[in-house]
Amino acid sequence: MKSLVIASIIAHSTTFISAVSASVHDAECCHALHASALGSNVYFPKSSSYDDRLDSYWSRSAALAPTCMVLPTCTEDVAHIIRTIVANNCSFGVRSGGHGSFAYSNSVDEGITIDFGFINKTTYNSDTKIASVPPGSQWQQVYETLAPYGVTVTGGRAGTVGVAGFLTGGGNSFHSASHGFGCDNVHNFEVVLADGSIVDANAEAHADLWQGLKGGSGNLGLVTRFDMYVIDFPDPGVTDIWGGVVGYDLGATDAVIDAYIDFADNVYKDQNSSTLPYLAYVPEAGGMILNVALDNTINAAFPPAFDGFLSVPGITATSLRSAPMQEITAELGLAQPYGFRHLWFSSGYKNDARIMRYIVQKHKEIVARLVPDYPADSGFNTLCLFQPITQTLVGHSAAKGGNVLGLEDRVKDGNGVMFLLGIGIHSAEDEAKLWPIFREWFDDVDSYATSIGANWNWHYLNYANLAQDSLASYGKASVETIRRVSEKYDPGQVFQKLRKSGFKIPAEVHEGTYGYQGANIEDYSSIDQKVLG
């Protein structure tokens, strides 16, 4: 017994010493950065600048308190920062627009957060038709900058989403059906590698890095510029798209699902139209709501592709109109308000009405169960969102050099639906209570999808929870590609060992139908603390 006690003391002492050592290294990093030319852009706790940046995170769950924040203003600053971090063996996290949902998605505790917020100026070269988009911008700023030129890019549909996380995680946009994922439309990445060197990654130079960055997230380097192919508006003087949101009576749910299934299977006929059906519990709106966002990127009013949705009885409201694209993205951004803590889960399924109906029914049941315990002032709200992942979309990706999202084998058997479950709440205590409830609910949905042969076992990184091991779900081939690129460009594995934010390259992939059989997690307790901060 005595030996067990001694062993326990030694183990706890070792952990304590390691933590103290890490804190010392982190403090040394912060002071070294503060003593450099970056000095005024290094923010420490209890300063107004530090607090303002914390307040600017979209999800309160993600707003962790690092030892310091450093905000570079140029690529050379970023190179200096990573060299300082490596020299001092410091832990760090990376923030782009600050739209990650979970703790450690884009920041760290007791480390350095590299915040790209000051690298935020988009430029456009009309000769090359390339837009150079910075990592620290939000898409709303990007669209507003490009609009006077009569062009746009494949960016986020909610204007508040950040650039770098969106693009390195894939990026689903209004233009996905016609142009592929956002990452597929990056001509060139300017990247700061772990040794501080600066390289361009494109189809001609560092092509392996170029491909790995298209879905590989923050595992390979710090992207300081995205050179993107632009999309011309049909009339350069009119940057309008046609779209908005249609509200329905809840009794129309089955008909809306049927319309969605048909739309997804026929999207190849009209690749300029997109849809986002969602159910949500919103106390301010009176409870449960059913909406469908409809958008046409060539400003065609009431295109036939939307006939199925617009012929459903029970439409209660609509904001459909021709409007500047940045107005539509601002509208969708308002549907994702700041100030909440968030839990997100994501999965991919076959385009099957049964799984959608099951999700809707289970969502209804769990909301009814929880509402009595979580009144309006708790901030409790939910979101069930569906998006098509089609053969057409994935075909565009392949034609543009491919990515590492691992969808090629999935769509061989038909189109799919990407599902996002989101939960919002005000307090950390309530978030901790809701986490196991919704984790269990989501696992139930996944199990049902498996039972009917509809489960892709694919978790889109930009929507996934840390528990879902998103990159592993992309399959063995994708993971091996990312790992091979990582070992080549980051031989010291800085972005695996010192980077503490975001998803890491998984150690192994468990073979299944599509090269992955779901998260190999028997007990989530080992990650609960990290997910919840």
Image: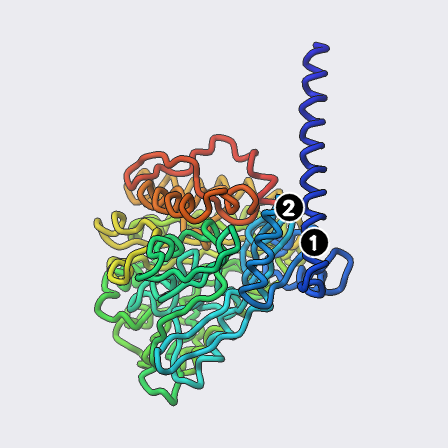
Q: Where is residue 171 in the image (x, y as percent from the top left)?
A: 41, 61
Tell me the residue that label 2 is attached to. Answer: 88
Q: Position of residue 153 (x, y in %)?
A: 39, 72
Occupied quadrant, residue 35: bottom right
Amino acid type assigned to the residue bearing label 2 in the image: Asn
Q: Where is residue 515 in the image (x, y as percent from the top left)?
A: 31, 39
Occupied quadrant, residue 252: bottom left
Q: Nearer the viewer, residue 226 or 362?
A: 226
Q: Which of 293 and 185 is in front in this view?
A: 185
What's the residue at 67%, 24% (across, down)? 11
Q: With 395 as the anchor, is 121 left or right in this view?
A: right
What's the residue at 63%, 57% (across, down)? 379
Within 10 Å of the Cα at label 2, are there few (<14), some (14-19), or many (20+) other Cα atoms? some
Q: Where is residue 172 in the image (x, y as percent from the top left)?
A: 39, 62
What's the residue at 43%, 56% (across, down)? 169
CB contact under 8 Å: marks 2 and 1: yes
Q: Nearer the viewer, residue 419 or 193?
A: 193
Instruction: Using the image, tell me which numbered label, if any, was put on residue 32.
Output: 1
Q: Quadrant of the N terminus?
A: top right
Image label count: 2
Query: In terms of secondary structure, where does tag 2 sit?
Result: loop
Q: In which quarter of the image is the C terminus?
A: top right
- Which residue is the extreme one toward the top? 1
2 or 1: tag closer to the N-terminus: 1
What's the residue at 54%, 61% (across, down)? 96
